[in-house]
Image (cartoon, rainbow, N blue to C red):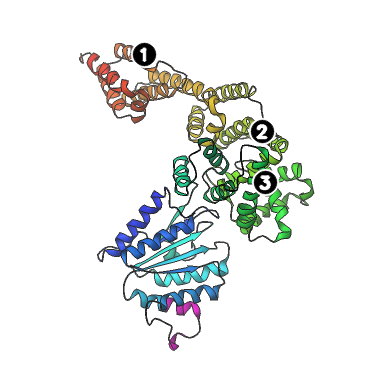
Amino acid sequence: MDSFINREPELRLIEDAFGDLLNKDTFLRTPIIDFYGVEGIGKTSILRKVIQTCDKNKIRYIWADASKNVPDFFHEIIHQAGQYGELLPNQNEGKDLLRQSIAVTQRLLGTGPLVMLLDAVDTMNDTKLQPIATMLGDLVVNNKLFVVLTSRRSVSFEHKREVARKLTTLPLLPLDRDSSEQYLNSIGLPPDPELREIIFKWTRGYPLAMNVMVNTLTEKVDPRNELGQRTLLTQIKQKVINEGILARVELAERPWFQIVLSLLSVPRRFNVVIMQNLIEEFAPSLKLANSLSYIVLPKRISQATDILSWNLAKGGFSIDSPVRNIFLLQLKIERPDDYHEINRFLVEISQSNANDASGPDRIRYQREYLYHSANSCTEEQLPHILATTVQQIIQEAEKAPEDLIQFQEEFSQDTELKELLGKHVDIVLSPIYQQLARKMYKDAIQEADEAKHVHYLHAFFSYTVQDPAIHDLSSLLKEQIDQLIAQERPAIVLKLYEKLARDDRFREALGKDFSELLARIRNNMPAEG
């Protein structure tokens, strides 16, 4: 990926670090930064951007490829340091390449600021990682050394505390829609809206996959017909999966990885039990001897590919989203029946797990039930499934109202699920917001404490304005506000007014009517008796 598009957080870190390097009186706030992500996400482009900044500010740098064997890696550091003057190792430093690398870098630092770029750090290989940690431990005491790492998985250096506390990690994510458009413009793709929609839908902003698609499209391949789609998919599989993700996997083992990764890409999250069920149901030839044998599979996959990790937010293992999307695409095009059957299988698992779980786990399984239902049912069936499920969630929340609030918050942030539901998303959101608004109003009536009373009234209005089923929001709010002014003491109305005036969500929902409604409250408040 040659174009550096929409990497504002990364740019800010880089610019801040260079500002500190150039200021003699400032300590580096981010001495070591690790930019991590899957193969082809844009890590090397960041290093090139750092080099451009070095050249612009006349700061020296060393770029070493950490994927090389350890002796070659340190030879590269020594060689590049030597390019800046008489900095080669001396006889007193012996033949230890690690010590020589530290010594020449320290001498280089003695003459001014230095940037060290370590590309492709392998977090799963202690044989390589430990010497790097040792080197950095000796070097980062100098405040004019800025180190930039790239890795597939975030580096922790947990056993080297003096390095770990100076480390900042930042994941590189796929490009969003607008940035993808900018990137396609930068490489000269014609402004064909339909074609660009297909590219984004297929790649989800994964730079490597976008490159492969654009290069293939220049060969007169049309993604709007079946032949073109299969040609494109073949190229993506070869360039992204075989030559990228599975590059370190032996050829004889690749079929196993391709089958297993394809299966594990269907669920958004999974545990060892779900992994076992999927393999035994849909790839019985790969069935292992017993349940304990499956426990080691996540580690095997992670060590070989670096695309599988435990996702704390999702409460399970997950395939990195850029790669997961490629496997899902392959499954949808080449084996659509299997794709729907696997989702139907996961619907049953999610429903069963939701029935057995409680709290946050139950909410996660409920969302996965909706996700897999939408991927396996017909367009006609989906509204009924959504409505029935939401009513069940609301009824269950009578005993634990906080669960409904958490479900609403998690669902609202679940971009993938909302995009999948499309026009049907309001079937989920509207009854939940209505129920929450009723609950807040009821709590407000029953609450004697003034501060809590105002809090519940504010929450009532907040949930009301978010209900997508309300078509004339302004008129409804005018009616509710008039009723509120008639029932509540002026002190309560005033405090509510102050809260609503600071509520950005309230302002955004009302748009041009925001000021009018606030004025309605202010102008109609009776004087305190």
Was residue 252 drawn as part of the magenta stretch in this picture?
no
Compare residues 325 and 412 and report the one nearer the observer.
Answer: 325
* Quadrant in which the C terminus appears: top left
On residue 66, which mark appears? none
Q: Residues within 10 Å of mark 1 (few under 14, many from 20)?
A: few
Q: Residues within 10 Å of mark 2 (few under 14, many from 20)?
A: many
Amino acid carrying mark 1 in the image: Ser
Q: Which residue is mark 3?
A: 262
Q: Is residue 321 above or below residue 39?
A: above
In percent of width and height, residue 85 lies at 37, 80
Span of residues in magenta: 88-103
Q: Name the main secondary structure of what is drawn in magenta.
A: helix
Q: Which residue is mark 2?
A: 347
- Kind of element beneath mark 2: helix
Give the image quarter of residue 24.
Answer: bottom left
- Kind of element beneath mark 3: helix
Mark 2 vs 3, N-terminal side: 3
Give the image quarter of residue 353.
Answer: top right
Was residue 96 drawn as part of the magenta stretch in this picture?
yes
Q: Which residue is mark 1?
A: 475
Q: CA distance from mark 2 to mark 3?
A: 18 Å
